[in-house]
Image (cartoon, helix red, strand yellow):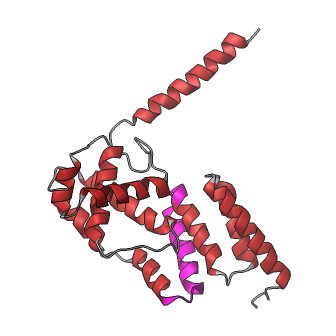
């Protein structure tokens, strides 16, 4: 028997969702997941709660749970355009952006691991923006921006005018897409999500920070 959703449930779910979004923006992902899950439990009919849960799961890197939450979102969403947009994430076929990436990146000496990182970045971007408008009329522009960004993360930089030539687009379009990816996904140099080198330089920074903290404690100990 389906539990009826009361007005109190709906109000409580709305409050939990708002708080969850605040945690999401601060990258407090575990607590955001708990809040969105509880909101969805109280009101399973509201697609936004499921989508926000998927956005948080993908930011955490849990693809299995992200797909599960997206399935619940698609089940409850009534906007056909949104349903079609997110159903595409379940397809094994490459979209136009991914096709550009798989055609150009290997040809220009990028490993399959780095190509995979660019495709991962594209999936995570599409989920993270939620229902925000996404202009896909020029897939070559998105592909170029993804390629450019993932190369910078992996210190495999090339001249941006070469990139524009490979993807038959403009330097301005690449920079615009690159800035959008950086802002939305909060990408940093050697980002663990997209770095594919054998040793990540960030590991040494973490080790140095831990060592410095230990030395500080010993220095201040009586």
- Residue 55 is situated, as x and y percent measured from the top left of the image, at 55, 65
Q: Quadrant of the N terminus?
A: bottom right
Q: Is residue 88 left or right of residue 8?
A: left
* 45 lies above or below 201: below
Residue 178: where, in percent of width, then height?
36, 55
Answer yes or no: is residue 116 visible. no
Q: In which quadrant of the rendered view does residue 158 lie?
A: top left
Q: Quadrant of residue 137?
A: bottom left
Residue 105 placement, left or right of 118: left
The extreme front residue here reads 172
Which residues fall within the magenta stretch? 59-80
Location of residue 163 (image quadrant): bottom left
Which quadrant: the C terminus? top right
Q: Residue at (28%, 65%) from the top-left corner?
A: 141
**Residue 189 belongs to the span the image colors magenta:** no
Magenta span: predominant SS is helix
| Residue 170 appears left or right of 77 | left
């Amino acid at each position: 028997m389906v539990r009826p959703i009361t007005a109190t449930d709906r109000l409580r779910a709305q409050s939990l969702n708002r708080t969850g979004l605040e945690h999401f923006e601060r990258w407090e992902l575990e607590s955001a997941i708990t809040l969105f899950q509880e909101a969805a439990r109280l009101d399973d009919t509201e697609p936004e709660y499921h989508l926000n849960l998927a956005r948080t799961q993908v930011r955490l890197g849990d693809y299995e749970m992200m797909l599960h939450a997206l399935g619940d979102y698609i089940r409850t969403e009534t906007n056909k355009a949104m349903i079609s947009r997110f159903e595409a994430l379940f397809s094994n076929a490459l979209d136009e952006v991914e096709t550009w990436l798989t055609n150009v990146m290997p040809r220009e000496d990028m490993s399959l691991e780095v190509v995979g990182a660019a495709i991962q970045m594209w999936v995570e971007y599409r989920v993270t923006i939620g229902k925000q408008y996404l202009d896909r009329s020029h897939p070559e522009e998105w592909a170029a921006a993804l390629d450019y960004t993932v190369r910078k993360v992996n210190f495999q930089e090339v001249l941006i005018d070469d990139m524009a030539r490979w993807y038959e687009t403009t330097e301005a379009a690449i920079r615009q897409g690159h800035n959008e990816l950086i802002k939305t996904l909060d990408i940093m140099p050697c980002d663990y999500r997209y770095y594919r080198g054998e040793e990540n330089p960030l590991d040494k920074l973490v080790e140095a920070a831990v060592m410095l903290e230990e030395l500080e404690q010993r220095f201040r100990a009586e």
